[in-house]
Image: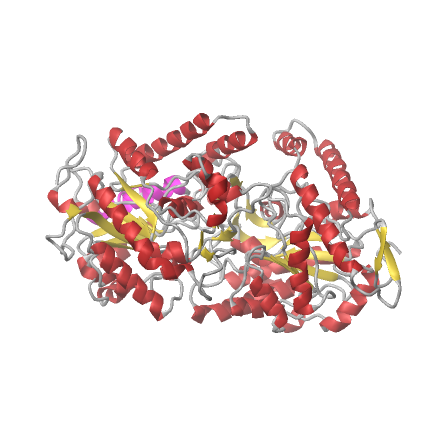
Amino acid sequence: MTRRGRWHAPRAEIVSSSSSSPPSSPQPTPSSPPHLEPTRASSVLGYPRIGPRRELKRALERYWHGDGTRAELLATGRRLRDATWHDLRARGVTQIPGNTFSFYDHILDDALLMGAVPARFRELVDGLTPVDTVFALARGRADVPPLELVSLQGTTYLYRQPEFDEASELGLRPDELLAEVTRAREQGVEIRPVITGPLSLLLLSKAAPSAAPSAAPGFEPIDLLDRLLAEYEALLDVLAGAGVTCVQFNEPCMTMERTADEITALRRAYDRLSAVATRPRILVTGEYGDLGEALPALAATGIEAIGLDLVYGRRSAAELADVPGLRGKRLYAGVVDGQNVWRTDKFATLDYLRELKAVFPDVVVSTSCTLLHVPYDVVAETGLPAELADSLAFAEQKVAEVVSLAHALVDGPTPRWRRLPVLPSARREDVRARTARVDDDDRVRVPYPERAARQADRLGLPTLPTATLGSFPQTVQIRRARRDLADGRIDYDRYCDYLRAEIASVIRLQEDIGLDVLVHGEVERNDMVQYFAELLDGFAATRSGWVQSYGSRCVRPPILYGDVARPAPMTVEWTGYAQSLTDRPVKGMVTGPVTMLARSFCRTDLALPEVATQLALVVRDEVADLEAAGTAIIQIDEPAIRELLPRRGADRRAYLDWAVGTFRLASAGARPDTQIHTHLNYSSLQVMKEAIEELDADVTAIVATRSIEWVLDALTDHTLTRQVAPGVYESRSGFVPDIDLLHERLLRGVDAVGVDRLWAVPDGGLKSRYTWQLEPSLRNLVAAARRIRRAVAPDPRGSNKIGHEQVPGHGPGIGS
């Protein structure tokens, strides 16, 4: 078949209806230079897209703020795409992925590729350009909430969750994808488009919250599979017509535990797609773990290639050889870790690749998943200890490892290969001795009913207390002061003056709004994990190791490489200063041990439970110091407990046992009259609900803004018996909820369990907002809570004056 334009593909590269079964020895993709043998084939499953210096973040925020034009934003995107293609080709990658760039989120992009605009957005996006359509769905506006923000398959990346209902309108919109293929080809680069597979696109989505009244009860997005497959069939035809010879469909949901019906649906989907008359070759990848039962289902279809995560889903060559049909596929061997930053042991990995090669004649060396989850280049980190830097591989180094391993399969290792170094400073005997002394008694507090009564007497909070979950927006002045301190332009005392002034401003604002429990705003913190990592032994922080979290939000995950110890208190000074400014209780804010572990690049030479125990003891010490300074409420944030949950049920209970035990070790040293809060991300699985109860926190705040039903169910059936704070509006969007909406959401909680166990909070921190956005939202939250209080009979013990009104109380306030 002749391609459009000047490029011509070998006949075998396009699968036609004359050959319904896959070739026994698939040909290399056209992006492989002709002089390279197939045995040297190399690829990556995706690449970072924010730019080495966060060029995309700055371009996005200039555009959103009105300081940059759409043309400037699009130009930045083109430069970043071009740089990625040419860098990968220059480094010797033989098969280059395309369509991995996104201005906000690739899952949302792929939903829009299929025309999946939820009904509630259609009027909003009418007439918008493609990029502005993405932003409308991802960011919403003051009167339209955005798509929900959820974690991608246990990673630290957050995506905007597509929404479907029975009446969802689908229709392929391939123009942007085809334009990228054409642009790459004009620069002499053949790319392999990367798209979320049909099963995962639906499984990663949710039923629209405002489904049509005629929708059948129990609708789930997977019910639309047949309709969606028609769009994927059309996509394959369009790509073949554009000269694309291989397309990559990512199916990360298939590395999770799946039902028999879902496995059958996977088989049916790829039987159908592989039967398309004229199409590119199909590569299906299973990122983030073992494909399990999905692997034989895929191997039995007519697709030509399968990508395996052989880091977190390692199988022996003999085990893989026993999968029927797999030997006839091209195998993309994901042997270089795409989620962590440690160097690959190339000698051991080469031995493993040789075993695979002896069984599978067509092997492509690859990464375990997209490199979206790691920073760009370790060479930029000039401040790391030399012995640590030598142990690290960021995206560019991982590409080099992939290419080097691919060549070594033919030529053997080069003299430049080195054994992995040993970190001499990683072990501390005092830390190991302390963790060895931990026993079950260290994880037990006095019974909750006794604690609850003593806390009520100490705090004197009103019915349905109002609060936030920690962070407030950081001003330009604070961010500039932090940079000036790092660069030596101001001293620490001057920096502290800025922080005290900002904390005072945050306290005054919260008092004026009328919140019952205040926070100091976390103005001293660059990030909820990095801040603590920079104050703890055993961590290293990077200067340029940025990783995209979502949209323009980037973080620098610290590197947890050694035994962890706390040289000094980390939060007491700023919490104590904030408390000195008000008579209302100020929460102490500490990031929990599991979240510090999950959102760092963690060492691999020590079992995770032991690392978590070290972190728990650090947090336990911080809680004790906050108590000694008079802090009555301490929030131990654990949003990442759900992120580390194993992908298959057989492993989940063991994980939750040590994760729950870690939290309890961190919190159980608190006095009975100290109220321990925690904050968790979306956790609707029954096993997670049970784990939330086992944490034994006094108050649990849960991200559940537009998925609140499961929280109410868990409250109604008494799975959760402590106080809860289901977030009633999304803190990361510009949507400003009105009083009636917040009142309705709070009433649902009251109806489920009564008013005494409920708190009124947003669903997360407010760092990403502006004051002009958060202030009306919080004022409406306070008004909605007070509306409910007025309907509640006064406490027979009297009342406590909070702000400007009399409300039911529970005894003396914290300042008494």
Residue at the image point whose x is 55% and y is 28% from the top: 66
**x and y percent of residue 427 in the render?**
54, 55
The answer to whether residue 725 shows anywhere in this view is yes
Along the line of sight, the residue nearer the viewer: 127 or 161: 127
Q: Quadrant of residue 397?
A: top left
Count of number-bearing discs: 0
**x and y percent of residue 200 in the render?**
37, 56
Q: Is residue 246 left or right of residue 569?
A: left
- From the image, give the main secondary structure of the stretch colored magenta: helix
Residue at the image point whose x is 55% and y is 69% from the top: 657
Q: Is residue 773 left or right of residue 112?
A: right
Residue 165 vertical placement versus 766 (above, below): below
**x and y percent of residue 324 in the render?**
21, 66
Q: Is residue 266 left or right of residue 536?
A: left
**x and y percent of residue 794 in the render?**
84, 64
The answer to whether residue 661 shows anywhere in this view is no
Quadrant showing the C terminus: bottom right
The colour scheme applied to this rendered structure is: secondary structure
Residue that extends furthest to the front in the rendered view of this protein: 214
Tell me the magenta residue range: 395-416
Based on the picture, tell me whether residue 462 belongs to the magenta stretch.
no
Along the line of sight, the residue nearer the viewer: 150 or 157: 150
Along the line of sight, the residue nearer the viewer: 564 or 322: 322
Quadrant showing the N terminus: top left
